[in-house]
Amino acid sequence: MPNHFHFLISGNERSNIPFKKSNRFGHSEQKNNSPVKLTLFSWGLQQLLSTYSRGINQKFHRTGSLFQQNTKSKRTSSESLNEDYSVWCFIYIHNNAKSAGLVAASEDYEFTSYNEYQNRKEDSICNIDLAIKLLSLEENELIKSKVTEVPPDVLVRIFK
């Protein structure tokens, strides 16, 4: 999207390990009593966005932030099927450009993984096999019927 992006990421057991910054001598700089503010996942995402910003700033001889808003994350999966809306998020992300009126069809948008999933591209940066497994994409009726509109009540749950 021109002004934002979405990732649907599956974490593992390491994702929520607290990140503790070490000084150059290998000692933790956080006090034992201070609350941990970052996980390894959030630190990694922070590094990715920071590195991207530095690269763009260098390329275009500019300074400052590229992003207007702080990154938000939301857990979409749950043991309860009533609370799990990962597939809805998958559908929302792939149809976002079409819903926003940027393209007539989702496959027409250049900056989406939609076509990678449709064509099962071998060189995809997406782990298509994992997504198929975790989201049951092969047998999921929403995917099979090519649902493109996320119901308003589901949108509220996604963005609350």
Image (cartoon, rainbow, N blue to C red):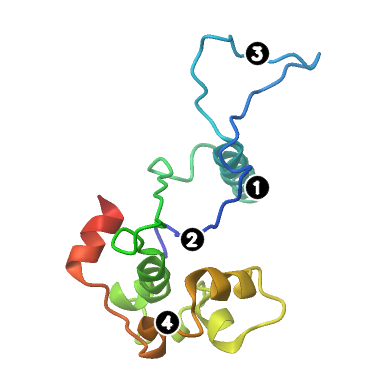
- The Cα–Cα distance between marks 4 and 2, rounded to whole angstroms, is 17 Å
Q: Position of residue 61 (x, y in %)?
A: 61, 44
Mark 2 or mark 1: name the one nearer the start of the chain.
2
Residue 39's place in the image compared with 82, above or below, is above
Q: Amino acid at mark 2?
A: Leu
Which numbered dot is residue 55?
1
Q: Position of residue 37 (x, y in %)?
A: 50, 26
Which one is nearer the viewer's eye here, 54 or 14? 14
- The Cα–Cα distance between marks 4 and 3, rounded to whole angstroms, is 47 Å
- The Cα–Cα distance between marks 3 and 1, rounded to whole angstroms, is 28 Å
Near mark 3 (Cα within 10 A), the count class, few <14, some 14-19 or many ≥20, is few
> Is label 4 or label 3 in front?
4
Mark 4 or mark 2: name the one nearer the start of the chain.
2
Q: Amino acid at mark 4?
A: Asn
Q: Residue at x 64, y 24 (%)?
A: 20
4 and 3 marks in contact (CB < 8 Å): no
> Is label 2 or label 1 in front?
2
- The Cα–Cα distance between marks 1 and 4, rounded to whole angstroms, is 39 Å
2 and 3 marks in contact (CB < 8 Å): no
Left-right relation of 44 to 85: right
Which one is nearer the viewer's eye here, 88 or 112? 88
- The Cα–Cα distance between marks 2 and 1, rounded to whole angstroms, is 24 Å
> Is label 4 or label 2 in front?
4
Residue 61's place in the image compared with 92, above or below, is above
Q: Residue at x 49, y 59 (%)?
A: 7
**Residue corresponding to mark 2:** 8
- The Cα–Cα distance between marks 2 and 3, rounded to whole angstroms, is 32 Å
Q: Amino acid at mark 1?
A: Gly
**Residue corresponding to mark 3:** 29
Q: Amino acid at mark 3?
A: Glu
**Residue corresponding to mark 4:** 140
| Residue 79 visible (yes or no) | yes
